[in-house]
Image: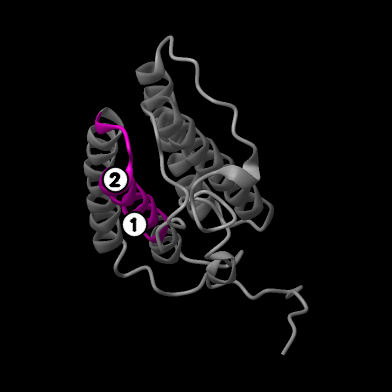
Amino acid sequence: MSPPASDSVIESVAELLAHALELEYASQAHYEQLADSMDVHHNAEVAALFRRLAMLSGEHAAAVAEHAGDLTLPRIPPWAFNWECPDAPEGADCLDPDVSYRMTTAEAIAVALHNERRGHAYYVHVAATATDAEARTLAAAMATEEVEHVALLEAMLTDAGGDQQRPAQDDLDPPHMPA
């Protein structure tokens, strides 16, 4: 993920927490949507993985909300969030072409891994550019947490290494895709 534009700098802990909450809520919603789609297409194993990732994003959101405590977080309109992609760094916008209803568990983990790396890059950028020292410290801690998420997904990807085959069943009603 490329860092946000130079004029979009986090200026407070409250602003950072508002961004972090949006990142986790968007991630949770996206993974739930993917899980629902996989369920509809009878790809139960990948649906279960996306549900697990949605649950983890929800837990991360709860931890951020707990950290916010009694702070009044700013209300930021969607177009004013300080990241470059249209969606949050762990959102859907950059990998939609890589998502298929017939994807394997390894492919799904690769999507999640890409998103976690984008989240890490975002927090590293905030840690380097925030104008508030406490926000820089918190962003650095969040970047470290994202490294842990990346390591977890890398281990899952290694475990799923043999899962490179598409589901065996024939697709009796394939989608019409432009050539």
Mark 2 residue type: Glu
Mark 1 residue type: Arg
The residue stretch that appears in magenta: 113-133
Query: Of helix, strand and loop, which mostly describes the magenta segment?
Result: helix
The circle drawn on residue 88 is none
Examine the rendered structure and indicate whether residue 63 appears above or below residue 137. Answer: above
Examine the rendered structure and indicate whether residue 95 appears above or below residue 10. Answer: below
User: Residue 139: horizontal and vertical position, in percent?
Assistant: 29, 38
Examine the rendered structure and indicate whether residue 28 appears above or below residue 106. Answer: above
In this image, 29 relative to 124: left or right? right
In this image, 151 relative to 36: left or right? left
- Quarter the C terminus occupies: bottom right
The circle drawn on residue 146 is 2
Quarter of the view holding residue 16: top left
Pointer 2 or 1: first along the chain: 1
Residue, x 68% and y 74% (percent of image)?
A: 171
- Does dot 2 land on a helix, a strand or a loop? helix
- Are discs 2 and 1 less than 8 Å apart at CB? yes
Residue, x 37% and y 24% (percent of image)?
A: 63
